[in-house]
Amino acid sequence: MKTSLSSIVSRFKNKKVAVWGDLILDQYLFTSAGRVSREAPVLVAEFEKNEYRLGGAGNVVMNLLTLGAEPLPVGFVGKDASGAILLDLLREQGVGTSSLVADDGFQTPLKSRVLSGGDNTKKQQILRIDTLPPGPASERARLKLVKSLYSALAASDLLVLSDYLAQAVIPGVFQALRSKFPEKLIVADSRNNLLDFPGVTLATPNEPEIKSLFPGRKFLKESDFIGAGSELLGRLGARGVILKRGHLGMLVFSRGEKPAALDIFGTSQIVDVTGAGDTVLAVLGLGLASGASLLASARLANIAGGIVVMHEGAYPVRRRELQDALR
């Protein structure tokens, strides 16, 4: 089993993947906790350093890159300071930015995390500030995005749809895309709008997302999740659905087959779940694009997710790490 999975990973190299979604700039502000303020009962923390990382669809891009693929991001960036930093981060990694559309009226999404701790203690997140676009990109920018998307997908083995903020991924555009490229593999992760994308090859909801899709259900036992996952598979007309269940592992729904349960890989003493869903999405897509079955791709994604949650922050898994875990 592990040998066959390892051979799938070796085929990830040089796969061309279009990533359509909401790119987010993640900011980490590291501080040291000193004292309580005299002005109010709040902590006074002294600034130490500032770090930027790629988040949202950008983290999917980073996972694809470190797994050996060639990602091409398609989305919006603002003509602002955060947008400039985001573009620099991509270019530093050798990722092409020609399919990203810069728009004067769009604000680059920024998530600022403040971490603090004593001199000899682990830094912990004490606050997160989200600076999100107050409105959509302009109509002109959207038309440019469609053109970029068609061009990127024509040259790609796979489309990954990463819908965090319902800004870049537009349901009407998706339907036109599905009609133009009916045979193209499309794997999707949508925080709030998954049902707007019928016809995807594979969908990857987590527990809170599937509960929101079926608000009338109580989800008290395993069979409730199995029933919802099976119904979602039919409603999307998808080839598969992967239900991510955190420390409970995954449920794999494949058309024409019985649902399969995968236990979590590694320990349940998780360090940080940030970005694990992006890793799962990237590995699943590459697995299918490499000719693997849905279940084999899910096994690989489950292992990759288990590696990522043992690191702090959005950590892109390396191809070598995944192959080492299969030995």
Image (spheres, rainbow, N blue to C red):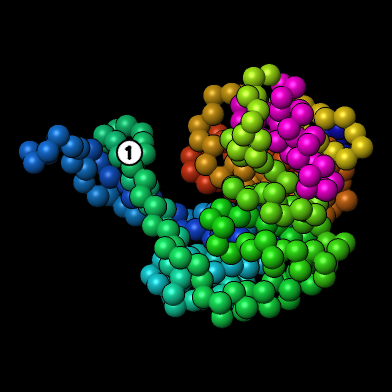
The residue identified by callout 1 is 126
Q: How many labels does the image show?
A: 1
Q: Position of residue 13 (x, y in %)?
A: 77, 57
Q: Report the magenta stretch's main SS.
A: helix
In this rendering, does residue 236 appear at all? yes
In this rendering, does residue 51 appear at all? no
**What residue is drawn where x is 72% and y is 55%?**
197
Q: Position of residue 239 (x, y in %)?
A: 84, 46
276 vs 132: above or below: above
Q: What residue range appears in magenta? A: 222-250
Q: Which residue lies furthest to the left in this view?
A: 38
173 vs 314: above or below: below
Secondary structure beneath dot 1 equals: strand
Q: Does the magenta stretch include residue 230?
A: yes
155 left or right of 104 in image: right
9 left or right of 46 in image: right
Q: Where is residue 92 in the image (x, y as percent from the top left)?
A: 53, 67
**What residue is drawn where x is 59% and y is 23%?**
268
